[in-house]
Image: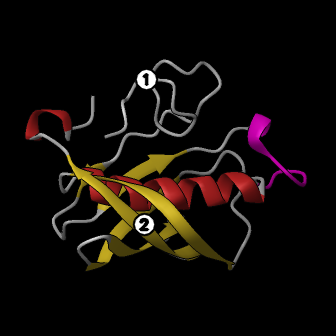
Amino acid sequence: MFEDDGKCFACGHDNPIGLKLLFELDGEGRSVATFVPQRNFQGFSKVLHGGIVCTLLDEAMAWAMILHGYSGATVSLRVKFRKPVQIGKTVTITGEIQRQGIKSWTMTSFISDECGQVLAEAEGLFGAVSKIPPEKSAPK
């Protein structure tokens, strides 16, 4: 099992340059977090860098597994960029389990703006690594 030392770039609470994402389960069993992109993560002027967009999408899928009691690792990730993610505007990142296999899970995620418009989406294949003890699967 992977050990959480608080330094994860996406969700680590002890990473001074990280995104500090906090995911929770919604009523449909999906992982959900909100995020306001800052200028230090931009690509083109006023637009979030595509690599950070990919990170958000990947993290949402990982947290969908974690919040359901499993740890996993990304095997593959396919991203569709639909519209630019604007710097300074709140977005919602959502991850969902599509198929849970014995050794691999198919996951999806998307980023939406304040109006609910999908800005980017992804599909990923994750290798299921291990079951997480219940006391360790809740966000800190």
Please, which residue is most extreme toward the left here?
Answer: 134
In the image, is residue 133 part of the stretch drawn in magenta?
no
Q: Residue at point 34% right, 47% down?
A: 23
Work out which quarter of the rendered image holds the N terminus and state it: top left
The magenta stretch is 39-47
Q: Residue at point 85% right, 51% down?
A: 43
Q: Which mark is residue 119?
A: none
| Residue that carries the numbered disc 2 in the rendered image | 126
Q: Residue at point 59% right, 30% down?
A: 18
> Camera-side residue: 138 or 5?
5
Residue 35 drawn above or below residue 17? below
Q: CA distance from mark 1 to mark 2?
A: 22 Å
- Horizontally, is 113 left or right of 125 in the view? right
Tell me where residue 95 appears, x and y as whole percent: 38, 65
- Horizontally, is 47 left or right of 9 in the view? right
Q: Are marks 1 and 2 in contact (CB under 8 Å)?
A: no
Could you tell me which secondary element the residue under label 1 belongs to? loop
The crowd level at tag 2 (other Cα within 10 Å; few <14, some 14-19, many 20+) is: many
Camera-nearest label, 1 or 2:
2
Could you tell me which secondary element the residue under label 2 belongs to? strand
- Which numbered disc, 1 or 2, marks the residue that appears first in the sequence? 1
Identified by mark 1, the residue type is Gly
Quadrant of residue 106 in the image?
A: bottom left
Residue 47 drawn above or below residue 115? above
Please, which residue is most extreme toward the right here?
Answer: 44
- Horizontally, is 78 left or right of 71 in the view? right
In the image, is residue 40 part of the stretch drawn in magenta?
yes
| Residue that carries the numbered disc 1 in the rendered image | 6
Main SS type for the magenta part?
A: loop
Work out which quarter of the rendered image holds the C terminus and state it: top left
The reply to whether residue 112 is in sight is no
Q: Residue at point 9% right, 41% down?
A: 134
